[in-house]
Each structure stands twice: as C-alpha cells, then as structure tokens.
Amino acid sequence: MKFRILIIDDEKNIREGLAEYLQEDGYEVECAKDGEEGWNFFNNGDVDLVITDLRMPGIGGEEILRRILAQAPGFPVIVLTGHGTVETAVNAMRDGAWDFLTKPVDMDHLSLKIKRALENRELVFKHRQMTEEIERRKQFNSIIGNSRNIREVFETMSKAAPTKASILITGESGVGKELVADAIHELSPRKDFPLVKVHCAALSSSLLESELFGHEKGAFTGAVSQRHGRFELASGGTLFLDEIGEIDQNIQIKLLRVLQEKKFERVGGEKTVEVDVRIVAATNKDLKAEIEKGNFREDLYFRLNVVNIFVPPLRERKDDIPLLAASFLKEFAQENGKTIEGIHEKARSRLYSYEWPGNIRELRNCIESAVVMCQSNMITVDDLPPVLRDTPDEGWINIRLGANMEECEKAIIRGTLSYCKGNKTKAADMLGIGRKTLLRKLEDIDG
Ligand SMILES: Nc1ncnc2c1ncn2[C@@H]1O[C@H](COP(=O)(O)OP(=O)(O)OP(=O)(O)O)[C@@H](O)[C@H]1O
Ligand SMILES: [Mg+2]
C-alpha cells in the first residue's frame, strides 16, 4: 500500500519540487495551492500525512492544523516555515504539529521525518483498534483477555455462574482470581444481592471465626452487642473466601457444616442461623498438597471444589499482554492527565519476552510506572522498570523486509536455536517440527 501525502503551499515551485521528490520516494502525492483547496482535499481524499506551509493567503497553515487535529486527533502534520520564523513553527508544534522544517527544505531531512510520522501513525492506529477491542470485551466485567487460555476460563465461568455450585478459584498470585470472583457474582442471578469478601489470611483464627459467623452479646470480652457475621451479611448473595488455604482446622469444620447444611451458630450462641449463600473461594496454594500434609480437610476441599476455575499465569497467555497493556495504559494515562498514544515496538517486545512472575498485577504496576516516567507520547524501553529495561532483546529476531521465504526460514531456525542455547530438541519443539526435520533443515542451511 502506498501512503498518500498532501502538500499545501502557495508557492508553485516548492509544491512541485516536493511532489516530485516524494513521488520518487514512493509516495502518492496530492498538491493544493492554498488552505481552502487543501482543506477540501483533506476531507475528500484518503490522506495519511499533510505537509503545509504556514503563511498562505486565505486559510493559513495554523488554521489548517487546527481543523485537521479537531477532526482527527493525532493526525501527522508537518509544517514548513520560512527563515527567521522559527517562533511560529514552535507555536505550531505546541498546537499539535508532528514536526516542522525550515525552507529551503532539506529533502533527506524531510524524508526521515515523514517516515517517522507514518510509523507513529501506524502504531497509533493499532493502539486505537485495541482500545475498541477492549470496550467490546467488557462483558466479563473488567477481565481483559482473548487468549485461548483465558477464553476457557470465561467459558467455565459462564457455565458455573448461574448455578449454586461452590467454586474454587486457583492460580498464582496476581493472575486475577478476585476479578474472576467478582465476575461470577455479576453473572449470577444473585447479582442484586451482596457480594461479601473475606480475606482469610488477614485475620487471626478467633477473629476470623467471629467475622464469618458473627457473635452473640457477651460471647467474649469486648463483644458488647450481638453482631452479624459475613455469612449473614451475604444472605441471598455470594461470599468470597479469599486465601482459603490459610484457615485453621477449627474453622474448616464450621465451614464444612455450613456448606453441607447451610446452618451455623454465632460465636457464643445456641441459636441456629440458616443462610442461603453461594460460596466462591480462592487460593494460590496447592490445596491437594496441603491435604497430603494434613493441613486441609479433604471433605471440605471437595465441598468447595465443586467447580474448579484455574486462572493460568500470564506467561501462559502472553497473547493477552498487548490488550492488557493497552488497557492499563489508557487507565493510567487518564489518571495522570497524560496523552500517551501507545507503546513503542521495542518496549512492546520487552513486555512480551518477560516472564511476569508477579503476573497481571506486576504488568499493571509496570505500566503505571512507565506512564509516570514517560516524557513523550509513546512509552519507550527507557520508561520501563529496570527488570524489563535491562533485559537484552531476547526472544526476537530481525528479518529485513524483502527477504525471501528461504532466508526467513533460515533466520527463524538460527534464531530459535540460539535462543534455546543450541538445544536442538527444545528448538524443534518450539518450532513445532520434529527433531529429525530440524536436523535435515540445518544440514541444508549449513550444507
Ligand atoms: N484479566 C485481567 N484484566 C484486567 N485486569 C486484571 C486482569 N487480571 C488481573 N487484573 C488486575 O491485576 C491485579 C491483581 O488481580 P487480583 O487481585 O484479582 O489477583 P489475585 O489472583 O487475586 O492475586 P492474589 O493471589 O495475590 O490475591 C488487580 O489489580 C486486577 O484488577
Ligand atoms: Mg486475591
């Protein structure tokens, strides 16, 4: 596809000189002799970039710039200015021009500026597409993702949410277990009743007991009045028990009883309270291992784990990184009052090759700090936190445009092999071919 450039200048020589040069450079060019004509062209033609003179009779360059940006924010406009009028050019930059050049125009300079502006435009465009995608995906609450792995999670969620079944959400720290719990509640018929959350690890055993089940007046020192526990508060709705792997045996037994009989007594009380509560629990512990060690009751485990939702770590759904990053970028740019159009290619590749031990929480923090550091309209590698900034560009290869298939294959094989530190079995695995096929291909390459 050829990019189309619109040149607006009242001087015929300049117009035609630039047009000729840019056509030779591979662009399609339209010329307009004044602002009026230029504005018409812009509105009717499919233009990718505008070069405009500033001082023209009628509608001047500044007005053209203003109109274009009002209609298409972020559109690349390069302004031309005569000698000694740098100040007007600076004003134009402040008004949102992409760049400026002084006359007489240095063609190589111009060529480079155009190239950069168009590259940026492509990135901005991609970023916009992604933002729209994000809007479309709001259905699972704020869980962003479109990878195969996360879609499986969505599928289980939509099946399980409308039922009364207890759900156990498992997965590493920071993968989004709490978001999944929120979404389950929202997708369930209980959504108009409370969703009550208890962070089990944060409370001592006795506090947790009274927190969950409430207490009667005088149950213990300080229990000056009767208090309803979270079970009662969640009546008709959902109770989310976070970090369920941390609760002790005593509470495990009480919990088991509520799950079986939907009944319990408040601490220090005789009266049996009945509740209709749906339980969703989460843990980043391996509960089966805890059962083996005798720390967690197996019967409780089965009661909780009627449906299991495993939320995979981010490194196993890297396809979600661009969407997640774009969404966090939008959020934090807004929060910090910054206009940031996107993430530079190199920085994106860093985000992609990193393994994210802290999962989505870490990615979110990383983008927040990058937004704070960012001084331009694009996040660059320099804006990233040190763990990402200081990693070499591993996991990527460069293939020049115009390379033929044979060269591409060669580069991919070589690159993968070096990425796998020469381990051919691993490289073949990664390439999705048999080891023998890889050996044959290597022979061809080396031969
Ligand atoms: N798919 C997602 N889309 C958007 N934001 C997400 C997604 N998954 C997680 N997050 C965000 O990442 C952060 C961590 O998520 P969350 O607290 O749900 O993780 P967790 O699995 O409960 O972690 P922990 O085990 O440490 O409690 C939150 O800020 C959450 O909003
Ligand atoms: Mg959590």
Image (cartoon, rainbow, N blue to C red):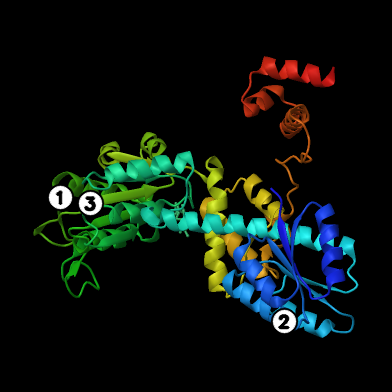
Pointer 3 local density, CA inside 10 Å: few below 14, some 14–19, many at least 20:
many
* Closest to the observer, 31 or 378: 31
Of labels 1 and 2, the one closer to you: 2
Of the numbered discs 3 and 2, the one sitting upstream in the chain is 2
The tag earlier along the polypeptide, 1 or 2, is 2
Q: Kindly tell me whether residue 369 is visible in this rendering.
A: no
| Mark 3, secondary structure of its residue | strand
Place of residue 40 in the rendered image (x, y in percent of width and height, measured from the top left): 63, 70
Distance in Å between CA atoms under marks 1 and 2: 76 Å
Residue at the extreme left: 271
- Compared with 306, 324 (above or below) is below
Residue 366 at x, y percent in the picture: 60, 59
**Three-letter residue code for mark 3:** Arg
Reading the image, the residue beneath label 3 is 278
Badge number at residue 60: 2
In the rendered image, which quarter is residue 369 located in?
A: bottom right
The image's mark for residue 262 is 1
Image quarter of residue 91: bottom right
- Residue 142 vs residue 343: left or right? left
Q: Which amino acid lies under the numbered mark 1 shown in the image of this protein? A: Lys
Residue under the image location 39 percent in, 43 percent down = 153
